[in-house]
Image: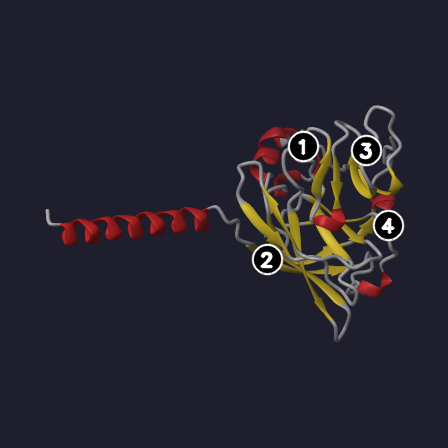
Amino acid sequence: MERREFVEACALGASGAIALMGQAAWAAQVRPKSYERVLLVDEAGKPLRASSLRPQTNYLFHYPFESTPVFLLDLGKRTSPIVLETKDKSRYTWPGGVGSRSSIVAFSAICAHKLVYPTRELSFISFRKGAALNPQTPSKGNDLIHCCADHSQYDPAKGAQVLNGPADQPLCAILLEHNARDDSLTATGTLGGELFDDFFRKYEMKLSLEVGPGARQTVRGQGVVRELEQFCRNPVRC
C-alpha cells in the first residue's frame, strides 16, 4: 500500500471510530419518556392552580400508573437545569422547575434503593423542610427528600440528586407543563432512571390489594393531588 492510500485508510478508520463513539455517546443519553397527558386537579376535581401550592409542603399524586406515587413540591425558590446520571451512568439534563418562579418540581416517590413508597397507612419517605434530624445519617443539606428506611437523601432543587445514603441514582423526574394563562399543571412524562418494572415485581401482591387490578394501568385525563398528610395516616419522621 502506498503512503497516500495508507493515510486515507487511517483517516477513514478514524472517522468511523469517531462516528461509533458519537453513536455510543448519543445512546448513553436518557431521553424523556412520554406518557398520557394528565391534568392535575384538586380533590373536588377542579384544575389545580400552581399558585395554590403551599411552599415546602408535601403534595402527592399518582403518575404515570395508578399505583406509582409522585411528590409535587413548590420549593419556594428558583431551580435551574442540571446534568445527572442514572445508576448505569447514562446522562440526562433535568430541566428545572416550572411555574412563575421555576420552583415547582415533581419526582417519583419511589426510593431508588429499596423501592420504599408512600401508602395510605405508612410513608417512610417525604420532603423535609430544613435539616433532616437523624444521628446516624446527618443531613448534607436543607430541604431534602429523606427516606427513613435507608436514610437516602435527595435534593429536589437539583433534580433529586442523591446527597447521602445507599441510593445509586436520583429519583425519577416527572415532567410538568405550566399553563400561564390559567395557572394549571399537566404531567406529561418521565425523565431519568425509571424503576416501575422493579416496583411492580416487588409489590405485585401488595399493589393488587391496595389498588386492585388497575395497578399497572396508566393514569388518564386527570390526576388528583392531595397533601401527603391527607393521603397517608402515618408519615414517619426520622
- The type of residue carrying mark 4 is Thr
Residue 41 visible: yes
Q: Residues within 10 Å of mark 1 (few under 14, many from 20)?
A: many
Residue found farthest to the bottom: 181
**Which residue is the site of mark 1?**
167
Q: Earlier in the sequence, mark 1 or mark 3?
A: 3
**Which residue is the site of mark 2?**
36
- The type of residue carrying mark 3 is Leu
- The type of residue carrying mark 1 is Ala
Q: Earlier in the sequence, mark 2 or mark 1?
A: 2
Q: Earlier in the sequence, mark 3 or mark 2?
A: 2
Q: Residue at x 56, y 54 (%)?
A: 32
Q: CA distance from mark 3 to mark 4?
A: 17 Å
Q: CA distance from mark 4 to mark 1?
A: 23 Å
Q: Nearer the viewer, residue 125 or 24?
A: 24
**Which residue is the site of mark 4?**
57
